[in-house]
Image (tube, grey):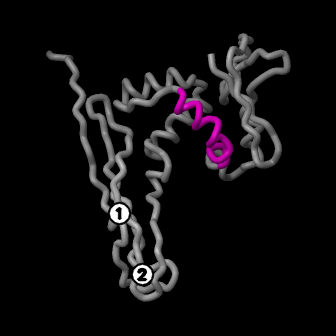
Amino acid sequence: MDFSRSVKKEIVKVSADQYAPKACPSCGNSEITIRTSHKRIISELGNIDTELFIELHVATFECKNCGAKYTPEHVDYPKGYEYSRRIIQTALSMHFQDNVSGNKIAAQLAKYFSVQIPPKTIYSWVNALTEEFMKSEFKTEPEKALEAYKALTIDGTGFSLGNKLLGKKKNVPLASAVKLSNGIYLLTWWE
């Protein structure tokens, strides 16, 4: 049995027609044309032997009736991100729910999903998307989102992030604070 592994690269094309509204969002007229367009290449969760990319066709449409211009956004491939929503959500879930560091997340995503992400990118998602992620994880009880994640003690040592509060005190070499919209700070750290 041969266990050698080679990773193939796969590109899936997603046209604007697949996710754009079929009518103008302003007036409802179905006579629309593409005004401008470009392509984005986005990393997606692959598997152990496939590195997967999405070639997303992004178009700005113009209504022939009212002249309104609009650029629909694909829900799975948010504007401004080189990675899919599934990759970002997987990384944040691993960080908060499974208590995994950004470095280990990057290694696991590369090993099991053939996704190459710098750990700094994962930490930037933790800083920028924590509040949004917490709200989605606690949809039914959003007030419990912040209570579920204890992060840093006053003396500069940490226990652990996530729902597995281990109680092991360790010095914290690098910490980050995120101010949430309600004025509460969420502190995270990396080892």
139 and 115: which is toward the camera: 115
Among the two numbered marks 2 and 1 on one chain, the one whose residue lies closer to the N terminus: 1
Q: Secondary structure at mark 1?
A: strand
Q: Residue furthest right?
A: 154
Count of numbered circles in the view:
2
Q: Is residue 64 above or below residue 132?
A: below
Type of amino acid at the residue the image marks with label 1: Ser
How packed mark 1 is, by other alpha carbons closer than 10 Å (few <14, some 14-19, many 20 or more), is few
Q: Which mark is residue 147?
A: none
Q: Is residue 188 above or below residue 183?
A: above
Residue occupying the point 31% across, 50% down? 55
Task: Name the spot of residue 14 as percent of width and height, x first.
Answer: 31, 56
Q: Is residue 136 left or right of residue 176?
A: left
Q: Which mark is residue 37?
A: 1
Residue occupying the point 85% across, 20% down? 154
Type of amino acid at the residue the image marks with label 2: Cys
The stretch in magenta equals 120-135
Q: Is residue 76 left or right of residue 50?
A: right
Task: Name the spot of residue 125 as percent of width and height, x first.
Answer: 58, 37
The image quadrant where one finds the N terminus is top left
Image quarter of residue 137: top right
Residue occupying the point 77% across, 23% down? 152
Q: Are marks 2 and 1 in contact (CB under 8 Å)?
A: no
Real-space CA distance between mark 2 and mark 1, rounded to the nearest whole angstrom: 15 Å
Q: Which mark is residue 63?
A: 2
Q: Residue furthest bottom?
A: 65
How packed mark 2 is, by other alpha carbons closer than 10 Å (few <14, some 14-19, many 20 or more), is many
